[in-house]
Amino acid sequence: MENTELREALQSLKSTKVRMTPQRHAILEFLFDCEQHPTADEIYKALEDKFPNMSVATVYNNLRVFKDAGLVRELTYGDSSSRFDSNTSDHYHVICDDCGKIVDFHYPGLDEVETLAKHIAGFNVRDHRMEVYGTCPDCQKKLAN
Amino acid sequence: MENTELREALQSLKSTKVRMTPQRHAILEFLFDCEQHPTADEIYKALEDKFPNMSVATVYNNLRVFKDAGLVRELTYGDSSSRFDSNTSDHYHVICDDCGKIVDFHYPGLDEVETLAKHIAGFNVRDHRMEVYGTCPDCQKKLAN
DNA sequence: TTCTTATATAATAATGGTTATAAACAGTAT
DNA sequence: ATACTGTTTATAACCATTATTATATAAGAA
Ligand SMILES: [Mn+2]
Ligand SMILES: [Mn+2]
Ligand SMILES: [Zn+2]
Ligand SMILES: [Zn+2]
């Protein structure tokens, strides 16, 4: 089965000045097929068989294009690499401190928090970020040995 | 009035192998006096009059020492500089997208979120992170002009 | 189809926050 | 005094990301 969301993403890019190149298509396809949340370098390495001459800058450039078009979200974590998420619907993440795994986590939006921040701090609230940290089941098993 | 929390922090360092140096004391004092959430470089610049020869590595080294001792918390934001918070009590932050200002924000801990993450994802949950983003009152005024 | 040109790619250099290294230094214990 | 341990300073290295620029190409026009 073809990926519907990928088709929609390609369609939405057509309506702008953005041209479709084989590299761009492959990066977008990988992102939408990918269940995990890959880094730029992971995307680069995953495609090096198909595009042995692709520059890492091309990956970064395209990730920015996709981000600006609202097709992917960037997840940032301190000094380590950003991760990219083609799922732009509202969801949170649970992150393993040991292996770095990122698991999607659905939870009703924290509207109340945003409202309170608006009232207490006087901010014009746009967004919020929430993540839960801990040890994933796999790493729990490994640690038990 | 002397800063009680600073005294307690100094006391807790004494009980370890950590030695007290003038630089270390000044960095810790600055962090506890500072109402904002300074970057390493801001601390470095704030102390360059008192310690014209201090290395920026000394600031980073000490921030790590304090972090390991549980005296300060590091707030990370993607590719930009980390910020450091001497307030280790439970609180959240509201952050201005325009000027970068970080405002403390008290809210009952999101225990429910942690519990759900544990049940749904099977994680051994350790903690969580939550931030609200928007435009601060000052920047709202500036934008209104 | 061929032409045109704005956009994309690839190769490489630059950036900037942070960390590593190593020599000099400063307390403390023996 | 000497040895020991931890600290500072200066500097180099690291590494993810971005900037630069010459070359290539996608896509609309002719
Ligand atoms: Mn996700
Ligand atoms: Mn704070
Ligand atoms: Zn894990
Ligand atoms: Zn602001």
Image: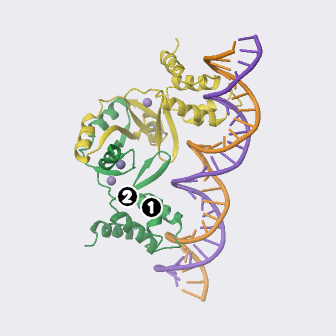
Chain colours: A yellow, B green, C purple, D orange
Q: Is residue B11 visible?
A: yes
Question: What amino acid type should be assigned to the residue bearing mark 1?
Answer: Glu
Say if A103 sits above or below B12 in the image.
above
Please name whichever residue, C1 or B31, is drawn nearer the observer in this view of the structure.
Answer: C1
Secondary element at image label 2: loop
Within 10 angstroms of label 1, few (less than 14), some, or many (20 or more) residues? few
Q: Which mark is residue B42?
A: 1
Q: Chain of mark 1?
A: B
Queried on whether the Cβ of the residue with tag 1 lies below 8 angstroms from ligand 2, the answer reads no
Mark identifier at residue B90: none
Residue assigned mark 2 = B70
- Quarter residue A130 falls in: top left
Say which residue appears at 53% left-offset and 13% top-offset: A2
* Quarter location, residue A56: top right
Question: Looking at the picture, does residue A115 appear above or below residue B89?
Answer: above
Q: Assign a secondary structure to mark 1.
A: helix
Q: Is residue B21 visible?
A: no
> Which of B116/B36 is in front?
B36
